[in-house]
């Protein structure tokens, strides 16, 4: 823990870019996005699946690590047996029930995990957040050389298709509708799902862009002009339609009803996708509000789940978290954590709205930034042994990557564990890691950029405000990169189980927020659990019929 860490020379220090936008980027992005049309494409059942379009080039030339391959082939009974062997106080029956839990809403998700250690050297997988539209397929080496689809097809076959077949039996199902994938970023993976869906269902699938509603919020755009830019529409009773490029005999663009859609919409989906819909949606919008895109409620969901399963000897490992923090109170909470903390806007993703605070300078930068919401989260910061948050609970420190050969540098990394709900219980479907930009140093100065040392997200903005990925910091679970992580099969089992627990916690939060008799969002309960008027106003934009 006290080993000296050598950093690379100043001339080789990489330029740190982030996913946060400055005013110039915001202006460029707004001018571009508010005047262009949403894109649309279609995939036919006869089309060839082209891996180069749906995987990073590095992935296509990689070989899965034997440890990872072995882990993916374990069944849930084996996982439970091993977990309970290493954790004798865990209840085997309760753990198996958790792994075989049938979610009502959240059937596909990915948790971001930190591999940490404490003062006594006990290691654990801490849940940072759980994503309800997780990326990962494009970064996952294939488990089999003759399977060009990777896990794209597995997700569609074992999770999406059974859901559609289940909903087909219910009254009100749109039998004559088409299939679609809607997205607002990551077209590489969204198109992979569309191609796989076309092959599995043996029919045409539409891939349709569906950008954030706030793109049009500050523009004098009437509804007629907006409809020319939009391709996705919803009726009052929750039926989705898409505007195609084809025209009818009168010269009007054809609108097609959608019976089922796969959602890869990450930015504020509640402001344009109804919470209650007749069109089958994987995952429905409620999972984002209940924790998949709402760090505030996710924290509460995790705590409630931990209270429920504490008697069974397992839990979701978490950093200490303070919810519903007013902006003016952020300095107080940072001070309580020893001047080192993580401040988060609860509803952002892709690294946006996340600020690491290790100095008065970084705290002031947070306070000087304008935000759209009323509430924040302040969390325990996990850094090096010499500079992590001070709490009355456990202090955690990053294990980091294996030291580099020359300077013995270790880097912070996170692990993304993506899993799906199947008829055989939860199963892993993809994994990858992301490395921070700069080494994990033993000592910090006030001039150091802590985000460069601790921030792992690959999404960054270019000069136009568009998302790009710094894939040079991507660590694959292949024969080359996986060894750098220092993880064992037992560590992967722990990562899988805590991800399962996180998904169950959020799914149960969904059940609390939805009225069982009507399927509508209970805004009264939401307001009590998450008192943020700005969020409620956004929800009402996409769900105007919800009683407020």
Image (spheres, helix red, strand yellow):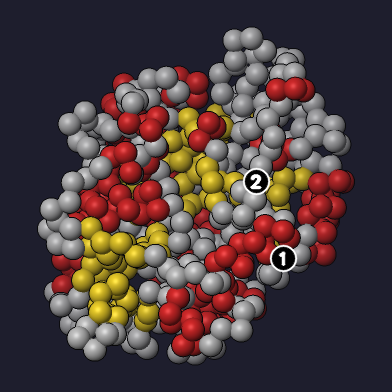
**Residue located at (16% from left, 66% from top):** 165
- Does residue 99 show up? no
Quadrant hosting residue 201: bottom left
- The residue identified by callout 1 is 371
Q: Position of residue 53 (x, y in %)?
A: 33, 43
Quadrant hosting residue 392: top right
> Which one is in front, 518 or 181?
181
- The residue identified by callout 2 is 18
Q: Position of residue 189 (x, y in %)?
A: 36, 49
> Which one is in front, 491 or 11?
11
26 to the left or right of 479: right
Image depth: mark 1 or mark 2 in front: 2
Q: CA distance from mark 1 to mark 2?
A: 17 Å
Count of numbered tags: 2
Which image quarter holds the N terminus? top right
Does 145 sit above or below residue 4? below
Q: Earlier in the sequence, mark 1 or mark 2?
A: 2
């Amino acid at each position: 823990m006290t080993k000296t860490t050598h950093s690379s020379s100043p001339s080789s220090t990489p330029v740190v870019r982030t996913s946060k936008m400055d005013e110039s980027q915001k202006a460029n992005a707004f001018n571009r996005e508010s005047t262009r049309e949403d894109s649309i494409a279609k995939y036919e059942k006869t089309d060839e699946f082209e891996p180069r379009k749906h995987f990073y080039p590095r992935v296509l030339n990689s070989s899965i690590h034997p440890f990872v391959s072995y882990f993916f082939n374990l069944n849930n009974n084996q996982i439970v047996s091993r977990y309970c062997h290493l954790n004798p106080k865990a209840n085997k029956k309760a753990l198996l029930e958790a792994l075989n839990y049938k979610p009502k809403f959240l059937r596909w998700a990915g948790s971001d995990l930190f591999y940490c250690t404490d003062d006594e050297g006990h290691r654990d997988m801490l849940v940072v957040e759980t994503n309800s539209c997780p990326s990962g397929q494009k970064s996952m080496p294939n488990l089999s050389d003759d399977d060009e689809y990777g896990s794209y097809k597995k997700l569609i076959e074992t999770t999406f298709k059974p859901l559609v077949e289940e909903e087909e039996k219910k009254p009100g199902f749109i039998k004559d509708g088409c299939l679609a994938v809607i997205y607002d970023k990551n077209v590489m993976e969204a198109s992979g799902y569309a191609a796989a869906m076309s092959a599995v269902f043996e029919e045409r699938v539409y891939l349709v862009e569906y950008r954030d509603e706030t793109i049009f919020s500050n523009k004098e755009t009437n509804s007629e002009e907006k409809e020319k830019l939009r391709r996705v529409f919803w009726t009052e009773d929750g039926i989705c339609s898409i505007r195609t490029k084809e025209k009818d005999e009168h010269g009007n663009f054809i609108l097609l009803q959608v019976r089922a859609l796969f959602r890869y919409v990450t930015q504020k989906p509640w402001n344009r996708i109804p919470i209650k819909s007749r069109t089958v949606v994987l995952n429905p919008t409620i999972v984002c509000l209940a924790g998949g895109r709402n760090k505030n409620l996710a924290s509460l969901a995790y705590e409630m789940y931990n209270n429920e399963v504490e008697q069974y000897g397992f839990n979701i490992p978490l950093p200490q978290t303070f919810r519903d923090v007013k902006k003016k109170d952020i300095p107080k909470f940072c001070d309580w954590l020893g001047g080192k903390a993580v401040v988060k806007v609860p509803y952002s993703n892709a690294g946006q709205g996340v600020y690491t605070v290790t100095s008065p300078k970084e705290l002031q930068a947070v306070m000087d930034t304008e935000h759209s919401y009323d509430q924040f989260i302040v969390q325990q910061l996990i850094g090096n042994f010499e500079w992590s948050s001070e709490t009355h609970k456990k202090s955690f420190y990053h294990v980091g990557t294996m030291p580099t050969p020359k300077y013995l540098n270790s880097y912070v990394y996170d692990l993304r564990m993506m899993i799906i709900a199947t008829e055989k219980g939860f199963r892993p479907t993809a994994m990858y890691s992301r490395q921070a930009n700069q080494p994990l140093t033993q000592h910090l100065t006030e001039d150091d950029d802590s985000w460069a040392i601790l921030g792992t997200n690959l999404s960054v903005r270019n000069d136009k405000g568009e998302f790009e990925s710094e894939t040079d910091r991507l660590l694959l679970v292949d024969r080359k990169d996986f060894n750098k992580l220092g993880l064992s099969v037992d560590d992967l089992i722990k990562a899988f189980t805590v991800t399962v627990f996180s998904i169950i916690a959020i799914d149960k939060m969904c059940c609390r927020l939805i009225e069982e008799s009507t399927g509508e969002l209970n805004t009264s309960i939401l307001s009590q659990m998450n008192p943020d008027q700005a969020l409620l106003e956004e929800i009402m934009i996409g769900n105007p019929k919800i009683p407020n």
